[in-house]
Image: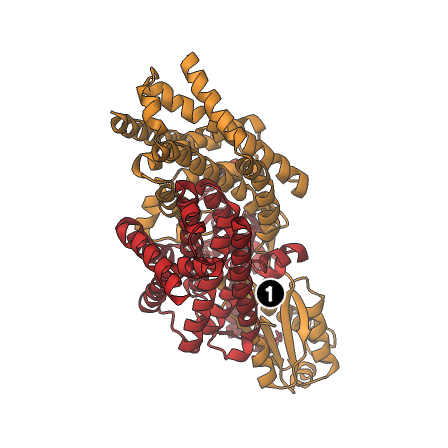
Amino acid sequence: MKHRIGAIARKEFRHILRDPGSLGALLGLPLFLLVMFGYAASLDVKNVPLAIRDLDRSPESRSLASAFFAAGDFVTAGSPETPGEEASALDEGRAAAVIEIPRGFARDLAGRSPAPLQILVDGSDGTRAQTVIGYIEGLCQRYEQDLLVADAARLPAMASAESAVDVRARVLYNQDLKSVVFLVPGLVALILIITAVVSASLSVVREKETGSMEQILVSPVGSMEFIVGKTLPYAGVGALSATTVLLTATLLFGVAVKGSLVALVATTALFIVACLGIGILISTIADTQQVAFLVGTLATLVPTFTLSGFIFPLRNMPILIRLLAHLFPSTYYIQILESILVKGTGFATYWQPCLSLIIYALAALLASAARFARSRG
Amino acid sequence: MSRIGSVIKKELIQLRRDKKMRAMLFIAPVMQVLVLGYAANMDVSDVPLAVFDQDMSPQSRGLTAAFQNSAAFRLVAAPVSQRQLSSELDAGSAEVGVVIPPSFGRDLDAGKTPKIQVLVDGARSNTAAVSLSYAVSIATDYGRKASASPLPAGMETGIAVPSLDARTRVWYNPELKSRLFMVPGIFALLAMVFTIILTSLAIVKEKEIGTLEQLMVSPLRRGELIVGKLVPFLLVSTIILVLAIVAVWFFFGILPRGSLLLLAALSLAFVVSTLGIGLFVSTIARTQQQAMMFSIFFFMFPMMVLSGFVFPIANMPVVIQAVTYLMPLRYYLVIVRDLFLKGSGMEVLWLQLLPLLAIGAGVLGISVLRFHKQLD
């Protein structure tokens, strides 16, 4: 048995080696993608284009305007002259927010009546808009406080007038809230699942298409032997590309392996096995590489990008979609990677996704062997 | 002309014969819209919260209730020690932790500024910043109200302080729902994926089985072959996009605010460029496997990440920003989102259309030339 698995694996390995272009693609591209996306993919809200229409043109209104740009979150997007220009700045996307300081702003401030500010926000991207509104409110509060302090200097009695709550906020695990830290687990999963599923499924379907499958079917090779032999070389390629991707993430993006290295290696191996199982399963369903590829993309690239919690939080999904998300191994793998790479918490916090991944890998391999045996029968 | 017709007919018959392919073509777009539309939601709501209340006074319970009553948070645990709180955060069962110190109620009554601690799980940095600012504003609001109600006797209340009255109005998407932003993006993504994959594979397949040579020795002219190959996929992608629009409307009640006709016309401009990419891939790849790898890694994946579908282009390093100008999806995303959310017209969208047309013409031209050369 070992001998036959070895023979299949050797043959497949030769296939890989004979096509250095594909091998290079399998190893080099993930790296290239990680580097590019590591630098490019950021959800931070910064450099928000802000237009200010100052109708008051007083020292106070100008100091408010400069307070907005001094914080560094906003960049200026011009100063519209008319309401029409305000609207077109938003319509054309030149500004993400417009602030209108009405006439009499300085007078109201001095007269201690609330000085009105008109703020228009482009809400198209709701998440971004929430953060922009938060920035604006924060800056308004800070401006008020600065005025208060200036007042208190003149009227010492007022210093203790305001008593709110002193909130000490602390961010855990990713202190600087850097997106790249939170994106790396998802990127690793994405790159691994695409290479593993697509290469495994195509390698089998190609034999179907070229007709060499029938030759294998009449040979004494068993179903399980065939599948193990087929997946082994790709498991090796997957392991190699996982190592390079994780190493690059550590070296370039300061993503440290905070948790156990052994657990990282073990769970990554599990994930690759599960992916290869899916790939083989797809290959038993598809007859042409075209279909295999479409199914493979829809089963890996798309759900890993959207369903796995990589970008969109799982808790926001309706229960049915959340169940669906748990049909894909990347959901578990990303949870595990988050614990090991970002949080550095112990095994106790991620044994559940580990267990799911083990069950998943076994089920995928058995199911693909069973289906393969049937198609043979 | 009749020769083009027969290539188109042949291509359509081939599509019809492949049952699994047919099912993929028509079920997949609807499924994608459905699943992605529900999943692509970055709203910060129901964030799991753990409150470690060391005070257990009416005031501290009031603060907990204030958190609970906000739509942003959902109380999932009331740990009784710092360790328990950290293990909730470690395990990810809570994403925000609040520590209320024993003196909270006393300080509030005494008019002193009480301290509380907010711990946020920064691992998911996209939502962490928003939940943090929600938590801070809920706590400050509560503090203001609680300290304002029992006014200490003898305190001067008549002093007015300088204050701003910021009136914020949100345009286009007043409820700030991320779904309204993501769903049109999914629509654009579908248009790209299907056209690139279908075109590239259809041509490479004929190369692989050798039927392309048969076509070449037929009286068919090169141009006729290309047109005949591309038109069926134009038809199929039109059907897919119509299906996707109907699905978006049916499941999410979202319809473009702008003109449907304009959407159709601009989509055509986009599809020309993606068909061009598909043709281009087919001239580089020798096997279908290569074609798939090329289209995923060199075109679809980079465009998904770099053209502003999820990650804002403004955040990218300048070099990468420059690259995004070459991506047709970048312009089409703006077009689709503007049409869906803002209801913009040509007076705004021509800015996107011009580069889109230029890229489309360029890509299609290069691929046609390359294709020609290969056939010779």
Residue nearest the observer in this picture, B329 or B197: B197
Residue occupying the point 46% across, 70% down: A267
Q: Which chain is orange?
A: B
Residue nearest the observer in this picture, A249 or B180: A249
Name the spot of residue B97 as percent of width and height, x first.
59, 75
Q: Residues within 10 Å of mark 1 (few under 14, many from 20)?
A: some
In the image, is B268 to the left or to the right of B261?
left
Name the spot of residue B89 as percent of width and height, x first.
57, 75
* Secondary element type, mark 1: helix
What amino acid does circle 1 point to? Tyr
Q: Chain of mark 1?
A: B
Task: Inspect this view and state whether residue A190 appears.
Answer: yes
User: By what rule are the colours in the image chosen?
Assistant: by chain
Vertical side of B14 occupied by B147: above or below? below
Residue occupying the point 45% across, 50% down: A217
Specify the farthest residue to the top.
B2
Name the spot of residue A306 as percent of width and height, x first.
53, 53
Residue pointed to by mark 1: B134
Residue nearest the observer in this picture, A157 or A163: A163
Task: Inspect this view and state whether residue A100 appears.
Answer: no
Vertical side of A83 occupied by B162: above or below? below
Name the spot of residue B195 as percent of width and height, x first.
45, 35
Colour applied to chain A = red
Please count the marks in the image: 1
Residue nearest the observer in this picture, A349 or B95: A349
Vertical side of A260 occupied by B10: above or below? above
In the image, is A336 to the left or to the right of B300?
right
Instruction: Give the position of the N terminus of chain A as an image quadrant.
Output: bottom left
Residue B62 placement: quadrant: bottom right
